[in-house]
Amino acid sequence: MSNKDYYNILGVDKNASKDEIKKAFRGLAHKYHPDKKGGDEKRFKEIGEAYSVLGDDKKRAEYDAYGRTFNGSGGGQPHGGFDFSGFSQGFGGGQHVEFDLGDIFGDIFGGGGRGAERKRGRDISIDIELTFKESVFGVERRVLLMKTGTCDVCKGSGAKVGTETVTCERCNGAGKVHETKQTMFGAFSTTRECEVCFGKGSIPKEKCPTCKGLGVTRREEEMTIAVPAGINNGEMIRMTGGGEAVPGGVPGDLYVKIHVKQDSRFKKEGFDIVIPLSIKLTDTLLGSSQKIETLDGELTLKIPQGVTFGERLRIKGRGVPKGSGRGDLYVKIEIQVPNKLSRSAKKAAEMLRDEGI
């Protein structure tokens, strides 16, 4: 019976989850793989043995209960070693733990068995500042960025204008290179992008003098950013393909973070806009008409008799654009209370008090 501490071998706690166990195994397998410099075959086999038990729910339960398993591994084998036949079978059959070799050993063998993924350029992030009115109605902004973009001379082909492209001899036009490595587990095939044609399958007969055949070049590029109506402070606009370009790949994205300047008059509440309006005490008693400044220009607002402090007067359709319509504008009433009264004003106020007003 084996007395190995599989948890200690993988460096995990006995309560570790399956994901934690898998992550530990991947890291150690990468570190000690015999084909790598500084690898250790004995340690690698020990790691594999530990994972074959702890990575399987049934075997792990047996190991936790009895310190061994009874189905051919984890101390039950004649030599106390790990059954490497599971690797050659892809860990998909029999009593072996199921693995995705492309997932676990992808970084060891240079790409795994899933095929080469297309390269992607770096994302770019910028900030722009808007006025309150621009955030409400939307606006177009033009920005000048220094970035790697598609060559505007050859349009990304990498070929000199007027010349042809020819089949890449390195990959025979496939755009991918297949490699097979012999390991202790058997033969492993990997696929990666051709480094000569950058995955295109063809190369220019004569290189573009501007980009030297790469199809991309670093230059200043003016971009138009369409800011939608009703955008809020802190929101992000994503422009697909607006980031850095890479030879043979797809460009990254441009992320634009919006900063809206605060306005002392206007506040936004969803699709509605609120503005304050200070009126005289007599306006609350008698009513009046007031000219107010809105985002659409000057309007005349009728103040009804008996309006109260904090009351909101609604003007339909003067808020933030939404779908086929707009929100509303609310005018919040604030009442001016005089600090001092003239003799006649005081007398008039006393008369109102006598009237019970």
Image: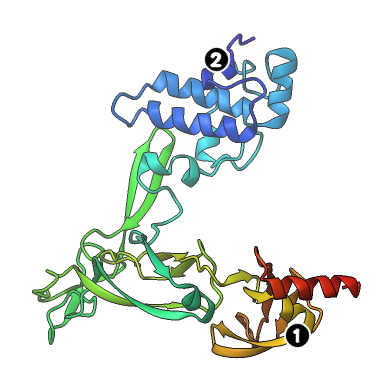
Residue at horizontal 77%, vertical 76%? 348
Q: Is residue 106 left or right of residue 18?
A: left
Element type at mark 2: loop
Tell me the colour scheme of the image.
rainbow
Which residue is under mark 1? 287
- Residue at the far front in the pictured view: 343
* Count of marks, rendered view: 2
Neighbor class of circle 1 (other Cα within 10 Å; few <14, some 14-19, many 20+) is: some
Front residue of 11/344: it is 344
- Residue 259 position within the rendered picture, expressed as x and y whole percent measured from the top left: 45, 64
* Quadrant of res 67: top right
Tell me the amino acid under the disc marked 2: His
Number of residues whose C-alpha sits closer than 10 Å to that of mark 2, classed few (under 14), some (14–19) or many (20 or more): few
State the image coordinates of residue 189 (x, y, percent, origin top left): 39, 49
Which element is circle 1 on?
loop
Left or right, 120 with reference to 132? left
Q: Is residue 346 above or below residue 21?
A: below
Residue 41 pos. (x, y %): 39, 22
Q: Examine the rendered structure and indicate whether residue 51 appears above or below residue 108.
A: above
Cα–Cα span, label 1 and label 2: 100 Å
| Location of residue 188 (image quadrant) | top left
The residue pinned by badge 2 equals 79
